[in-house]
Image (cartoon, grey):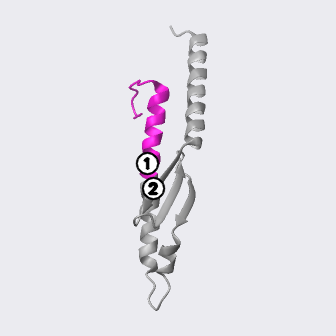
């Protein structure tokens, strides 16, 4: 038979772990760039885009008769996608760290 007090204690610990992971993820910031640093995206561990930085030289190349806006758009997408991959790695690392290497189905 399952001890209700023990179950409640386990649920409380699980909630504390979840809160700790969420706190860590909010504080984790990853950066990724594309185009040799022309575009840099910053994202937190919750996969929220925090900042896009575009090098002025990338914008300067947009002046002229036929600006290559599409290239700049592609660089932004590439930087954001790479930041998302790095954030996912941070998420996995954070979850595994809190669980202490436990192998639970559907996690990690």
* Circle 2 residue: 32
Q: Is residue 16 left or right of residue 57?
A: right
User: Magenta includes 105?
Assistant: yes
User: Is 69 situated above or below 33?
Assistant: below
User: Nearer the N terminus, badge 2 or badge 1?
Assistant: 2
Residue 63 position, x and y percent, is 50, 85
Magenta region: which residues?
84-108
User: Is 7 situated above or below 105?
Assistant: above
Q: Label 2: how many residues lie within 10 Å, few (<14), some (14-19) or many (20+)? A: many
Could you tell me which secondary element the residue under label 1 belongs to?
helix
Could you tell me which secondary element the residue under label 2 belongs to?
strand
Q: Looking at this view, is 77 or 60 the one in front?
A: 60
* Circle 1 residue: 86
Residue 31 position, x and y percent, is 49, 53
Q: Are marks 2 and 1 in contact (CB under 8 Å)?
A: yes
User: Is 2 situated above or below 11?
Assistant: above
Q: Is residue 24 left or right of residue 36?
A: right
Residue 34 position, x and y percent, is 41, 63
């Amino acid at each position: 038979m399952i001890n209700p007090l023990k179950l409640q204690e386990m649920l409380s610990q699980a909630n504390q772990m979840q809160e700790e992971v969420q706190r860590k993820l909010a504080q984790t910031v990853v950066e990724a760039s594309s185009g040799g640093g022309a575009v840099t995206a910053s994202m937190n561990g919750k996969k929220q885009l925090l900042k896009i930085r575009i090098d002025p030289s990338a914008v300067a190349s947009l002046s002229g008769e036929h600006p290559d806006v599409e290239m700049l758009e592609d660089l932004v997408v590439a930087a954001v996608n790479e930041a998302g991959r790095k954030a996912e790695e941070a998420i996995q690392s954070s979850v595994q760290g809190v669980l202490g290497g436990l192998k639970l189905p559907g996690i990690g």
